[in-house]
Image (spheres, rainbow, N blue to C red):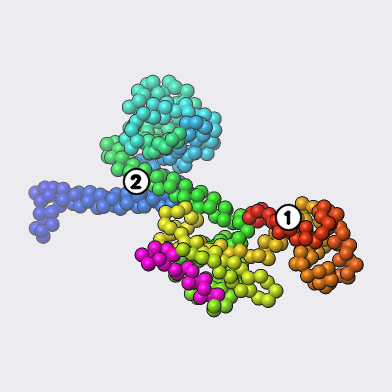
Amino acid sequence: MGRQPGQSDGNGTRTGRVKTARQTGRLSIDRSLAVMDLVGLIFEAALDPASWPAALDRLALATGSRYASLGTFNLVTRQVAAAAVGYDPEYLRRYTEEGWATKNIHWQRSGFTPVGQVFSPEMFVPRDEFVRTDFYNEWAAPLGHENALGVNVLIEGANSTSAAVTRPFSKDIYSPEEQRLFAALVPHIQRAVQLQHRLAALEMHRASSVEGFNRLSDGVVIVDDEFAILFANRAAEALLAERDGVRVDSDGIAGGTQADTDTLRGLLAARAINGTPGAGGRCQLTRREGRSPLSALVVPLRNGADWPVLLRRHANLVFLTDPDHEARARFTALRGQFGLTRAESAFLAEIVKGDGLQAAADRLGVSLATARTHLRHVFDKTGTRRQAELVKLAATGPGTLRDDC
């Protein structure tokens, strides 16, 4: 007589029912690992939106679906943005561009379902009613977009985000196990979408902050209390690249001389008695002969302010002003305003130094007669008659935006 299921084979090994239980346990472990992997993909998509198709593809596989989608609809603009897998691109285009999204009877009636609650089409529309709609016959049926599980993931203002998995009627409705799996994944999808929205908002703000700093003619540097540079705008990057007056060494931001480095770092490291950031201050950073020194203004920052970088500790905002650049900007603006030639503009830059016509001619390498001609033309074009008036005019410069913006 053969052994019955579950009977010992004499070696302590049970057969039949026990073996089936082991197989079931192995499948359960494999399924749990697959779900954990899927959760990881969902959160990877939060950090990289381009990864949503991979996460949705795995979601469809896990729930026995042909399609999976995650989309946002704006109630005001009527615009749809969606990530989806399994769809023919042409049908997906029709759904988003030809208005089928707004004709989706399930979406219309699921709008009042609480966020996070999983729903199926039969909760809103009996199947026999659904199959008589234009939406079913012209869009859903050709795709086999019939059985479905859906959820309102997030509603913020006019934007409503929902997720869904679908398959044809031929595969029957979703089983209780498939529904439980989908429901278990919903909180992870919600958190991923919320995280993605927050990261997108931070990135937009950071990008706009960076662009604002990049439009300044002054160099702007954010430096922590260990003198490391956390951020530098374009003007500051140009100054640092010159390594004339300000530079970066192995210990962080530095001046052109040891004395200047000590002064600058003293301002950066200053603290009040109670340990709060110091008051900042201003110093001059010496440059090579023939160039005006840079002016450095140190302003302490506090956490909580909106800066292009996350401040994990005390930091300072350092404004680096290049007087030579300011002068070039002023004369560029004057040249455009009064129609000066490049030679006349160069002459104006020299004559306002106030040491006479001959000195200006010598620096430009032109004759005194040519210098007088330039002076007459500049007087005529600017409506001035004395060099003192030219000095006053040259002292009124343009705003702080870069001349190349």
Give residue 122's quadrant in the image.
top left
Horizontal relation, residue 56 to residue 183: left or right: right
Horizontal relation, residue 342 to residue 400: left or right: right
Q: Residue furthest right?
A: 369
User: Could you say which is closer to the camera, residue 150 or residue 135?
Assistant: 150
Query: Percent position (x, y) of residue 113?
Result: 34, 30
Give residue 272's quadrant in the image.
bottom left
User: Could you say which is closer to the camera, residue 159 or residue 213?
Assistant: 213
Residue 332 can be seen, yes or no: no
The residue positioned 34% from the left and 46% from the top of the image is 188
Horizontal relation, residue 41 to residue 139: left or right: left
Query: Percent position (x, y) of residue 297?
Result: 54, 64
Q: Which residues are magenta?
A: 260-278
Label 1: which residue? 333
Give residue 350's quadrant in the image.
bottom right
User: Could you say which is closer to the camera, residue 308 or residue 200?
Assistant: 308
Query: Percent position (x, y) of residue 364?
Result: 81, 70
Secondary element at tag 2: helix
274 in the magenta segment: yes
Residue 187 can be seen, yes or no: yes
Residue 188: assigned label:
2
141 in the magenta segment: no
Secondary element at tag 1: helix
In the rendered image of this protein, does residue 395 appear above or below residue 88?
A: below
The residue positioned 35% from the left and 49% from the top of the image is 39
In the rendered image of this protein, does residue 265 appear above or below residue 5?
A: below
In the rendered image of this protein, does residue 40 appear above or below residue 121?
A: below
In the rendered image of this protein, does residue 216 appear above or below residue 162?
A: below
